[in-house]
Each structure stands twice: as C-alpha cells, then as structure tokens.
Amino acid sequence: MAEIRKPDFICVGLPKAGTSTLHNVLDCHCDIAMPPVKEIKYLIQDELNYNGARFWKLFSSGWPAQQDRAFFARFCKRAAKLQANSYEAQSFARYYFNPRTDDAWYRGLFHPDAVSGDVTVNYFWLKEPEIRKLAADYPWMKVIIMLRSPVQLNWSYFRMVALRKKESGVFEPERFLREIEEKKQRIGRYAEMVRRWQSAFGEDRVMIGYFDGLRDDPVQFFDGVCEFLGVDGAEHWDDGMRQAMGRIVNTSPKLQMSEDLAGPILELSELNLEGFEAIKPRYADLWRGHIEDARRSVMRAA
C-alpha cells in the first residue's frame, strides 16, 4: 500500500500571530483543503493527554473543552448539508470519534488530492530532538512559522488569559506570574526556536511569516504563502478568500494591566527578541521600539 504523504505542511504558531486567519484563508483556496478542525495537536498529544477519541474530551472542564464544544455544535448545524462520503464529513468523524492510535489516524485527516496542512500553535516549542524526529518522519512536509512583535503578542495573549480568569472568577495574580515564567522557559528566544526548525527541515522548507505583513498587505502575504506551498496566488482567489482575509479573529477586549503584571510581560518580550537581528534586522528594530513604547505607556499609567 502506498505511503500517505500527508500533511503537506504544518503551521507551528505562534499563538495570537494570525494563525486562525491563515487557516481560514487557505481553506478558501480552490487547491487547498484544510481539516475542519484547527489545532489538531496530534504531535503533542502525549503531553496533553489527548489519546483516545476526541469526542469524550468534549465533556471535560477548562477552556480547550469549551472551544471544542462550541466548534462541535457549529459543525453539527451544517453537517446535514454534507454528503456522508465527503472529505469534510469523514475528516470530522475521524477526528472526534476514532481513537488517536498512530500516524495513520493523523494522516487520514488530510485531503488526499489537495494541499492540506495542520495549524497548531503549540508545536512551535517542541524540543530539538522532537523536531528532528518530525523532520525524519515527514521528510516531504513544509513548515510555516508565524511571528509577531513579542510585546504585542504577549500582551494580547495574557490579556486573553486574564479576561477568561476574571470571567470564571478565579483570576489569581500569583498564578498569572508563574505562567509568564513558564513561557520564558518554553518559548525563550524567537531566534533560537526558528533556527531549530530551520536546522531540522532546511531553510528552504521553512517559511517565516510576520503578523505585520499579514495585517498591512494581506494579498502580498498570502501570495508568498501560496508560492511557498506550490499553489496559484491572488489571480485564482475568490470572494471567500478575500472576505476571510478581511476578518480579524481571536481578538481580545481591552484590559488595563497593573504595573506588577506589565513588568514581567515586558521582560518576557525582551527575552523573546534576543538575537533576532540575525533573523530579520528590520523587525528586530521595529519590535524593540514596540517594547519601549509599551514601557513608557506603563510608566505614564502608574
């Protein structure tokens, strides 16, 4: 039996850097068929205890289960319009109802006759031996890394976390600070993590995408993504793709951070940016300016 050479690519993060927009826009491309579920998390399933059928996780507590339940409900509403043997219906059923036994389960989620990929932001901080094993197991696969100004990304992420905690009535500043320290250890320096992926897969199979480019010129940005994936660019886009490009997803309401929380976030952002001049000098300078702007803003509010 011929080997199933899927997925064609993975997008490994970062969170809050435009990965949902990337997934939604690519899913509108006539030569690309994305799985119906973003954040498959198969490559980190042991760490997350995701073994077994995903359906039973719908009854768990916590934010990931809430997201899953909301998506499951939305999909079920349109399921009646799908043919039972359609790719989308079969992929959805495999994801939720089949146990995650091996790579055959994972590869079977992706359309066999179209470019298809896995967008899971937590893959970014896989350890170096894990990344090298991934490159050996999937030698055909390409990698997209989405990056964003560290202070903007961290502020957006932790604002989202804080709002969720406040809504649930369990916001604890001490626990919040511990999570920041954990991210220092896991994410660390952007440059170091990028080099891990480039070293394992080769620079020609790794694309670094920038949120700034996605926001400022989405057509040019997605033309670059399409070229990287080997599919036609803007001249083959339809209205659905252009509408998906215009939507901003996963935005968080404004929340004023206290100085004791803002300080550690700025420290984390500075750590993220160390050595990034070697990757992209222009963005290194721009993003350092964002950190200084944020620091002045915090000082004025104090």
Image: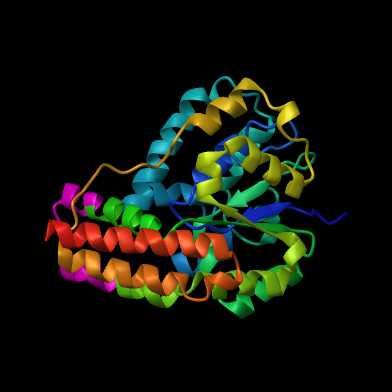
Against 58, residue 240 (above or below) is: above
Q: Which residues are magenta?
A: 163-179
Q: Position of residue 9 (x, y in %)?
A: 69, 53
- For the rendered model, the colour scheme is rainbow
Instruction: Say if residue 278 shows up in the picture.
Output: yes
Please say whether residue 265 is one of the residues in the magenta stretch: no
Total numbered circles: 0
Give the dominant element type of the magenta stretch: helix, strand or loop.
helix
Q: Position of residue 215 (x, y in %)?
A: 50, 41
**Residue 163 located left or right of residue 80:** left
Q: Position of residue 166 (x, y in %)?
A: 17, 51
**What residue is at 27 percent from the left and 53 percent from the top?**
159
**Residue at far left of view:** 302
Toward which corner of the image does residue 293 lie, by quadrant?
bottom left
Against 28, residue 129 (above or below) is: below
Toward which corner of the image does residue 129 lie, by quadrant?
bottom right
| Placement of the C terminus among the 4 image quadrants | bottom left
